[in-house]
Amino acid sequence: MNRTNSIKGELLNLKDKIEQIAKDQGLDFDPVVFEVCDYETINILAAQGGFPSRYPHWRFGMEYEQISKNYAYGLQKIYEMVVNTNPVYAYLLSSNDLVDQKIVMSHVFGHADFFKNNLWFSKTNRKMMDVMANNATKIRRYMGQYGIDKVENFIDRVISIDNLIDINLLLTDFHQKHKLEDEENEEPKDNSKHKAEYLQSYLRSEKKQKEKAQGIEKEGQSKDKEPKIKKFPEQPQRDIMLFLLENAPLEEWQADIIGILREESYYFLPQMMTKIMNEGWASYWHTTLMTEKMIEAGELVDFCDRNAGVLQMGRQQINPYKIGIELFKDIEDRWNKGRFGKEYQECDGLKEKGNWDLKLGEGRGKIFEVRKLHNDVTFIDEFLTKEFCQRAKLFTYKYNPRHGRFEIDSKDFEAIRQKLLAQLTNFGQPLIEIEDGNYGNRSELLLAHHHFGIDLDTKYAADTMNAIYGIWKRPVNLRTKYDDKEVIFCFNGKELLPLK
Amino acid sequence: MDHPIKRDHSRFKKIIRGKIRENLKQYVSGREIIIDKGDGKFRLPMPQIDIPRFKFGEKSQGGLGQGDGKVGEPIDEKEKAGQGNKSAGQGEGQKELEVELTEMELAQILGEELELPRIEPKGKKNLKSKTNRYTSIRTVGPDSLKHFKRTYKNALKRQIVGQDYDPDNPLIIPVRDDYRYRSAKQKIEYENAAVVIYMMDVSGSMGDEQKEIVRTESFWINLWLNSQYKDVEVRYIIHDATAKEVTEETFFHTKESGGTLISSAYQLCQKVIEADYGPQEWNIYPFHFSDGDNWSSEDTKVCLDILKDSLLPLTNMFCYGQVESRYGSGQFYKDLKEKFGIRHDKITLSKIKNKDAIMDSIKDFLKKGH
């Protein structure tokens, strides 16, 4: 069934116009395909992460219910949706008026440029539409074969660990591991060469399992000869999905499902790491394109209204659109005026500093460079300034148990910066590694949480460890800090117990 | 065809229904408020079901915000004021789901969880109701009601008669005249009728908490009886030293005080039944809630006589629920127990200690199935 239609007529003309202007401004993107659809369809797509075809799972149904309700109650409306593929797919809501469509299109070209040029996206598989659809078919087949409940329950467990992956694999390790793989492999290089690393490792595990099945006896002998216990894994490993894929006692279909979900996780990872930048960049460009070129006099009020909505300040949560665009603008301004570097930093005169303008005009160039090289963490780390924090009225808040409410805690620059960085580090997820796959020589797992000042939610941790237990089939231990004390929690298959 | 997400959606709903069953006690005890939407649907609040992942604890985390305000000011007064200590938190996490269930679905969950038997109605079926049954056939109708078998049979007949039919290549093509459609016939059905008569002691010793228990319990009883009978009438009687029939509104909100003569209520109940509900035709369920205090043992005697001689022969079942209160002696329960025994076929006694006991009490009342 065709739920989306390609644009034509006025919208198509608009698209061509905006595309040309965007290119003239220096944006560089893969072809963008705009499709129009109704709200029902956009709700479905949003529930499925932008993709028309996903594997069956109740969580998409839950997302769908939430989004539909929010829409029905008028709480939230999805304006734009853009999918990082080649070509880039973007969806327009048919009921939006022309100003909205203009804004959305301009915004989308910003995203498309970011997808193509940002370093963290450089290894992303751009054929994800097909991959997701194939994954869906595979999992449907497993459901037919092994039963819907069984497969869905297993997927439940795997989703619980889909944030336990390694951001470094997106970049550097990619190549190194890749090389190792090639040296180990004497087989002719097939088309797996341009498959991403995380796929490779899955293929490798498949091979390993086969070998294991064939050579169990052999292994037994060699173990006798070398009684030395090797640490396993040799180095702490952040990609816990991969570790379980390679080492847990899994049936083939289960390994395949972990592989599939891992692949999808890595696909979404760069977007999670660049939320502020990506939205900021797109917002920067929709504002720039609209105000400089596209807007007509009659649309100004509507434009401002929509823009104000998108760029609202949030008291409980910073709005990535808002912080992102403001920071990009700030960087542009600073590099236009030369407000950076040692000399500017050391300037004491308040007035002098306020009027500092070297007329460098390097702003545009600088923000293009920033959008290429940074992710949210380095972006904030490098470009958030004290002046900016004051102007943007940023503050940190915390829970005050005495009053039973959240209160503004500090407006200090360093506090804000630290808080923001803490929130963004490791794409906002706790940093957890596999430290030992044979903990206490009982083939238990030992996970280590790198504590940066924020405790884990123990209830969630218990449930997650339960899920891992379901995959690993042996007790799961977690070393973390709780109330400033180091503890090891053990999940023994029934409950979470503190060991030390 | 529906989008596959509809299937995800219905699986999600199934999971939710399971959660409601699991937490039924929270709803039955009135801890989680069920909102009657008035259109036969109920809205149940329930915590967001979440996929467990390692995540940061919310309270210790705090967060970042943007806007005016001095250090120490709450970040969102409006929301906090109403919601007590529900955390605002960062990002997701605070979402609450609201689930909508029809009366039937809710009753079904209650029935399954409490293992309630279906009620065996007595009496003649005398309540007329009309239903549409698709039992006949027409030559016109909407495509959705097309009767394929008949249609193709007709086409086959026509083709055989017209010698268009080739058994070696049995190709049957219906034309306009062959089409047949299901059509509805109205049927009059007779249903069992039921009436529930609630009696409540509103004397001084029955506090707000006790009334809340009665209210909650009667909600669930109504729900169950509604699912068992097509039409259920409900009458309300309150009593202290005298009894009167009142509206639902008054029943739950009035605050009388004074002495207690339970017999007054039973007499009125008897009158109501005799006036409006012939026991041959109606299934009659009187429920009496009190804290067990009666004015005198003489009056209690009167009550027991009314029950034995007049009320019990008329009713399917007489239910007495004793709500524990600080001032009540609970004597009436003992008296009833002494007189009729605890296993009497037509009397069900139940003690409701607190909100948590509502569920067991409902089960006590309804498990007999008549």
Image: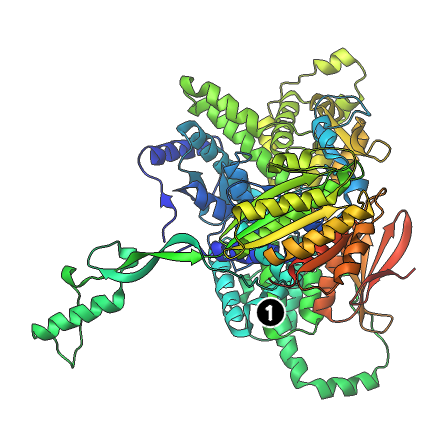
Q: Is residue A34 left or right of residue A198?
A: left
Q: Quadrant of residue B234?
A: top right
Q: Position of residue B69 (x, y in %)?
A: 75, 21
Judged from this view, the residue extending furthest toward the top is A351
Q: Locate the N terminus of chain A and report the quarter of the image it occupies.
A: bottom left
Q: Position of residue B305 (x, y in %)?
A: 71, 53
Q: Relative to B149, does residue A409 appear above or below in the rendering?
A: above
Judged from this view, the residue extending furthest toward the left is B162
Q: Residues within 10 Å of mark 1 (few under 14, many from 20)?
A: few
Q: Position of residue A395 (x, y in %)?
A: 75, 28
- At horizontal 57% and vertical 62% (from top left) the residue drawn is B119
Q: Is residue A199 visible?
A: yes
- Per the image, the residue denoted by label 1 is A150
- At horizontal 77% and vertical 33% (from top left) the residue drawn is B257
Q: Nearer the viewer, residue B105 or B204?
A: B204
Report the colour scheme.
rainbow
Q: Nearer the viewer, residue B154 or B121?
A: B121
Q: Is residue A5 left or right of residue A461?
A: left
Q: Specify the amino acid type for callout 1.
A: Lys
Q: Is residue B37 left or right of residue B142?
A: right
Q: Nearer the viewer, residue A365 or B168?
A: B168
Q: Is residue A479 left or right of residue A156?
A: right
Q: Is residue A124 visible?
A: no
- At horizontal 40% and vertical 34% (from top left) the residue drawn is A95
| Chain assignment, label 1 | A
Count of numbered labels shown in the rendering: 1
Q: Could you tell me which secondary element the residue under label 1 belongs to? A: helix
Q: Relative to A467, does residue A15 appear above or below in the rendering?
A: above
Q: Locate the C terminus of chain A and report the quarter of the image it occupies.
A: bottom right
- At horizontal 43% and vertical 30% (from top left) the residue drawn is A102
Q: Position of residue A34 (x, y in %)?
A: 41, 42
